[in-house]
Image (cartoon, rainbow, N blue to C red):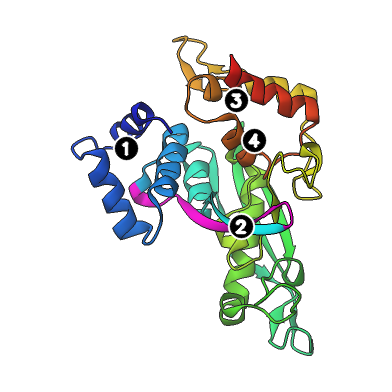
Amino acid sequence: MSKANQVVAIKQTGLSAMSETEVLTVLKNSLYPGASDNSVKMVLNYCQASGLDPMQKPVHIVPMSVKNGNEYEMRDVIMPGIGLYRTQAARSGEYGGITEPDYGEDVSDDKEVGITYPKWCKVTVKRIINGSAVEFTAKEFWKENYATKKRGETKPNAMWERRPYAQIAKCAEAQALRKAFPEVGAQPTFDEMDGKQFEETVIGSSSSPASTQSKPGLPECTQKKFDSMCIDDIDGESGEVKKMGWESLVKSGSKTAEHLITMLSTKYTFSDAQLETMRSWEKK
């Protein structure tokens, strides 16, 4: 994030009375203790692009284990909190409320897990479309979502052991919000991923082709989708840019090509040609 963009982010979030150094100090000491300057700047960058107030902590800094060759290294990534999805749904003006979590039968004889947990949880989000409330339901199974203490173990970590019902309810709510409001994005929330083991491969690493480096199961970014996301979203009446496309983000200096690729590769799988196109924006 360039210094100019950091200043813009600070002004847009109502912190213009403070210097950049003061803002970073406040965020590091209050909301992100122990975080590096670069990681907090990533938060400001994310908030600037989305029109968010960083002081409300809409996103989290999450350490991710990244495979680089034959070794692993830790990198910080930015993940939305479920509160951000709730805020975006409310801002749409079409949010019609959410049901209380509906739980499946308790499972108490699972020796692998060792605790009593609900088999599944179901949550319904309502969206007002053309004056009518349309329901979007998500049903999430506990064993498909819970986080373990360590990689290779089956016992839940401290959070999932202490809050087996609340944690799966957050997962179901986040999924229901994504179904009802797909514009909030496809990225999993911090609440869903809390305590889970991350394993990503560095893009461009010689140990793995760039086109297959992402998590298995991610949707392919079709060429039609790719082309549409590269274009700026322009307001039809004012002609102003409402949202910068991927290409503009790189060419304006808001993000480097590799930073953009790293962020987007948590959502999509890209072809070699698409990755090369993104890198070429930085060269022009």
The image shows residue 107 at horizontal and vertical percentages of 76, 83
Circle 1 residue? 13
Asked whether the residues under the numbered discs 4 and 1 touch, taking CB atoms below 8 Å apart as contact, a structural biologist would say no
Looking at the picture, which amino acid does disc 2 mark? Answer: Glu
The image shows residue 104 at horizontal and vertical percentages of 74, 74
Local secondary structure at mark 1: loop
State the residue at coordinates (65%, 25%): 279
Query: Which numbered tag is attached to residue 246?
Result: 3
Secondary structure mainly formed by the magenta segment = strand
Q: Residues within 10 Å of mark 3 (few under 14, many from 20)?
A: many
Circle 2 residue? 73
Q: Nearer the viewer, mark 2 or mark 1?
A: 2
Nearest to N terminus: mark 2 or mark 1: 1
Asked whether the residues under the numbered discs 3 and 1 touch, taking CB atoms below 8 Å apart as contact, a structural biologist would say no
Local secondary structure at mark 4: helix
Q: Nearer the viewer, mark 2 or mark 4?
A: 2
| Position of 114 relative to 66 (above/below) | below
Q: Quadrant of the N terminus?
A: top left
Query: Which numbered tag is attached to residue 261?
Result: 4
Looking at the picture, which amino acid does disc 3 mark? Answer: Trp
Looking at the picture, which amino acid does disc 4 mark? Answer: Ile
Nearest to N terminus: mark 3 or mark 1: 1
Q: CA distance from mark 2 to mark 1?
A: 33 Å
Nearest to N terminus: mark 4 or mark 3: 3
Looking at the picture, which amino acid does disc 1 mark? Answer: Thr
| Position of 199 relative to 221 (above/below) | below
